[in-house]
Amino acid sequence: MKVALVHDDLVQWGGAERVLLGLCEIFEDAPIYTSVVDFSHPILNKKFKNKKILTSFIQKIPYWKNFYKSFLPLYPIAFEQFDFSKYDCVISNTTRFAKVIISKPQTIHISYCHTPPRFLWNFSEDKQSFLSDKQSFSASKSLQFFPSYLHFLKKYDQISANRVDYFVAGSKNASLRIKDIYKKDSDVIVPFVDDKFFNSGENFEGDYYLIVSRLNKYKKVDLAVDVFNDLGKRLIIVGSGPMLSLLKNKANSNIEFIENITDEFLIKLLSGTKALLILGEEDFGLSSLESQAMGKPVIAFQKGGVLETVIDSQTGLFFREQTKTSLKEAIQKFESLEFDKEKCIKNASKFSFENFKSQFLEIVLKLT
């Protein structure tokens, strides 16, 4: 059976890219089709340099790295132009446009959907975050001054969902969105925790809290910066994105920033943290499981995918509102409680790669 993988773009390292790497392990001979790839990104280069990757015409546009989000109108065209006629099965791994590919009737298209496009459907601030990115200047102007184009994209997104033969959602949260927006049923196969997070050696309790996140507006990392500025407690923020400069300028000296770290360094940071913080509404929240796999609890906003990954008051603590008061109260309560390392590890162990692999292969074999 000939299989191809499709991914939105390879320009950053996050949960969707970890899933893509897992799919590469399951389907070892499958090439990756994507809009663009940035091999100057050290982690992407390390993880994907030996994979067969086919990119769209956008990759050939001069200086695309500076303006790739400005090419928003081109992405549907880029994915529609790929030819999958020689494949028995195509698997799109997507949060945006990878699922709009056109396949022949004899080719099964399975879409692993982490979420429908956030900037189109979910939250006004998600859309604003996408549009306010400096790289998105041209796209933001077109969408702000021509609302009909945004309306067209929504209709296009819904119509092109009919090209998918079978939806697989990355969480119950995503499955509800798929049903609501596309009127499609989906099986749920949750992402997996890399085994290396379970076999990481001795933990210790350091003096810091940790955030591991893309620094986009909807991630609400600015809320943590405000709170830790007030509390004076040590906070380490791992990640990059359009909010980085603003957050750095806002942060006091007790807050540190680190970009583009390896898994090995992430494991060292997790091994010494008091807790991992998740401030936004996550589609799933893989980092919460990586933390628990190392026996470390999570403090998270009580909405979205973390409701599937964190057990309140056992493997972590929820706060109800995205406000300074609510987060402060959660941190203060957290420091008065004790969490069982083994309960955290046991909870994370449910989300293994072997479970992910067996469930995915079962669906592929059933459909082909």
Image: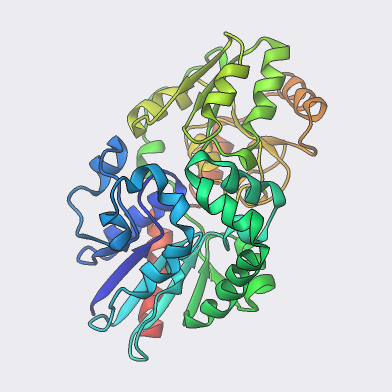
Query: Number of callouts in the render?
Result: 0
Above or below 206: residue 112: below
Is residue 56 in view from this perspective? Answer: no
Above or below 317: residue 334: above
Return the x and y of residue 40 as percentages of the image width and height: 26, 38
Which image quadrant for residue 87? Answer: bottom left
Which image quadrant for residue 3? Answer: bottom left
**Left/right of residue 259 with respect to residue 289 in the rendered view:** left
**Left/right of residue 183 with respect to residue 216 in the rendered view:** right
Farthest right residue in view: 325
Q: Residue at x 72, y 48 (%)?
A: 303
Q: Residue at x 55, y 40 (%)?
A: 288
Above or below 171: residue 159: below
Farthest bottom residue in view: 105
Quadrant of image for the C terminus: bottom left
Return the x and y of residue 359 as percentages of the image width and height: 43, 68
Is residue 42 in view from this perspective? Answer: yes
Quadrant of image for the N terminus: bottom left
Q: Residue at x 71, y 39 (%)?
A: 301
Q: Residue at x 38, y 77 (%)?
A: 364
Farthest left residue in view: 50
Return the x and y of residue 76 as percentages of the image width and height: 44, 69
Return the x and y of residue 125 as percentages of the image width and height: 69, 46
Could you say which is closer to the camera, residue 124 or residue 259? 124
Query: How was the colour assigned to the protein in this rendering?
Result: rainbow
